[in-house]
Image (cartoon, grey):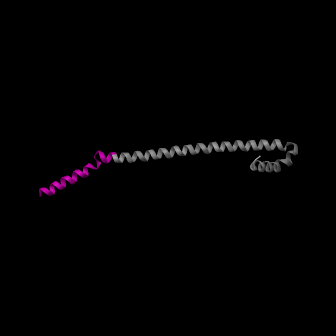
Amino acid sequence: MSKVQDMLYRALNERYGKMYGVSNDVEVLRSEISEMERRLKKTRNELAQEEWVRSQLEREAENLMRGLSQQEISARESGFGKRDTQYAERSTQYDRAR
């Protein structure tokens, strides 16, 4: 038996030993430990699910940020920045014509 199980047996024995008597102690302790293990397993599963959801949300956020960055690059390449370049060329031509 592990130290944790020993501690649980002792704690539960102190708690229930007086109420049920010595003969029922082992059965009560085993059922309590089984219940605690069941709760622990449920909690672990819930934590694992929360971790999975969190990782999915982080991945989604990263993908959205990448998508926004890609849209900005595409906008610049598709003409958003071309206006500035064309304006600079025209003003240079205008300055030369003077």
Q: Is residue 21 visible?
A: no
Q: Residue 43 location, x and y as percent?
A: 65, 44
Q: Residue 71 location, x and y as percent?
A: 36, 45
Q: Residue 31 location, x and y as percent?
A: 78, 41
Q: Is residue 79 magenta?
A: yes
Does residue 23 appear to the left or right of 49 in the view shown? Answer: right
Q: Residue at x 62, y 43 (%)?
A: 46
- Residue that sits furthest to the left in the current view: 98
The C terminus is located in which quarter? bottom left
Counting the numbered discs, the total is: 0
Q: Is residue 68 visible?
A: yes
Does residue 92 appear to the left or right of 15 in the view shown? Answer: left
Extent of the magenta region: 74-98
Residue 70's place in the image compared with 97, above or below, is above
Q: Is residue 59 magenta?
A: no
Q: Residue 32 location, x and y as percent?
A: 77, 44
Q: Main secondary structure of the magenta part?
A: helix
Q: Residue at x 29, y 48 (%)?
A: 80
Residue 48 occupies which quadrant of the picture? top right
Q: Residue at x 61, y 45 (%)?
A: 47
Does residue 22 appear to the left or right of 44 in the view shown? Answer: right
Does residue 97 appear to the left or right of 1 in the view shown? Answer: left
Q: Residue at x 66, y 42 (%)?
A: 42
Residue 64 occupies which quadrant of the picture? top left
